[in-house]
Image (cartoon, rainbow, N blue to C red):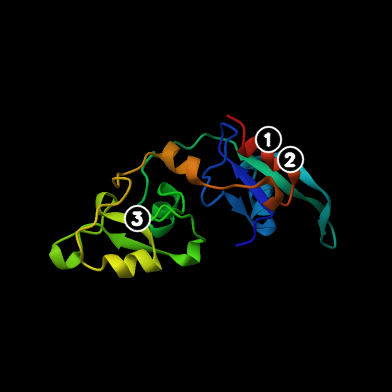
Amino acid sequence: MSNDCLLLNGNGKPLSYFPLSTIDWKTSIKLVLTKNVIIIKNHDDWVVRSPSVTVDVPSIIMLRRFHKFQNYVKFSRSNVYLRDMYKCQYCSDIFERNRLTLDHVVPKSKGGETSWENIVTCCNSCNTFKGSKDLKPINKPIKPSFAHLLNGHKLKASDFPDKSWSEYIFST
């Protein structure tokens, strides 16, 4: 999905930070026309025309109502990378996402489960070296909080199509 428009919750914060709550321009216009959102900012030089109507394309919109979400952190590969901050938990080197694997601290062959408390990020060479040996990771794997994951997420203002998104994403 394209990231043409930033979607904020009723409190002015993004609905989610990872992935960032963005929607495509068509969906943003539909939400505006159905009056489900408030337009915070339109793109400066982007309009859509039909034979009878000209509509500014929104850059930032906010839901009219606040939607409460659970602070539940879903177990996923991406979230494990964020928790461990892209660092191999055996050699402490930092890697790109495509050079990391997930490792079971207690191997599956020895009854280890796939859970927050038994999975760590690991580079290929350390994972191969470890095999089914009983090596302990540098940091004990834990189930992270939402705030913990947010600290490991790398949002860069240079990646946003509109610089004004920064004040809504990076504000506390």
At label 3, counting other C-alpha atoms closer than 10 Å, the crowd grade (few under 14, some 14-19, many 20 or more) is: some
In the rendered image, the residue lying farthest to the top is 172
Residue at 82% from the left image edge and 54% from the top image edge: 46
Q: Earlier in the sequence, mark 1 or mark 3?
A: 3
In the rendered image, the residue lying farthest to the left is 110
What amino acid is found at the position of numbered circle 1 in the picture?
A: Glu
CA gap, disc 2 to disc 1?
A: 6 Å
Judging depth in this view, the residue of 161 and 8 nearest the camera is 161
Q: Earlier in the sequence, mark 3 or mark 2?
A: 3
Q: Secondary structure at mark 3?
A: loop
CA gap, disc 3 to disc 2?
A: 40 Å
Could you tell me residue 129's position as x and y percent?
30, 68
What amino acid is found at the position of numbered circle 3 in the picture?
A: Tyr
Marks 2 and 3: in contact by CB < 8 Å? no
Q: Which residue is mark 1?
A: 167
| 116 shown above or below 133 | above
Q: Tally the marks.
A: 3
Q: Which residue is mark 3?
A: 90
At label 2, counting other C-alpha atoms closer than 10 Å, the crowd grade (few under 14, some 14-19, many 20 or more) is: few
Q: Secondary structure at mark 2?
A: helix
Judging depth in this view, the residue of 53 and 11 nearest the camera is 11
Could you tell me residue 39's position as x and y percent?
71, 40
Labelled disc at residue 164? 2
Judging depth in this view, the residue of 33 and 106 nearest the camera is 106
Residue at 25% from the left image edge and 68% from the top image edge: 131
Residue at 34% from the left image edge and 55% from the top image edge: 90
Give the quadrant of the N terminus.
bottom right
Could you tell me residue 160's position as x and y percent?
69, 50
What amino acid is found at the position of numbered circle 2 in the picture?
A: Ser
Labelled disc at residue 152? none
Q: Nearer the viewer, mark 1 or mark 3?
A: 3
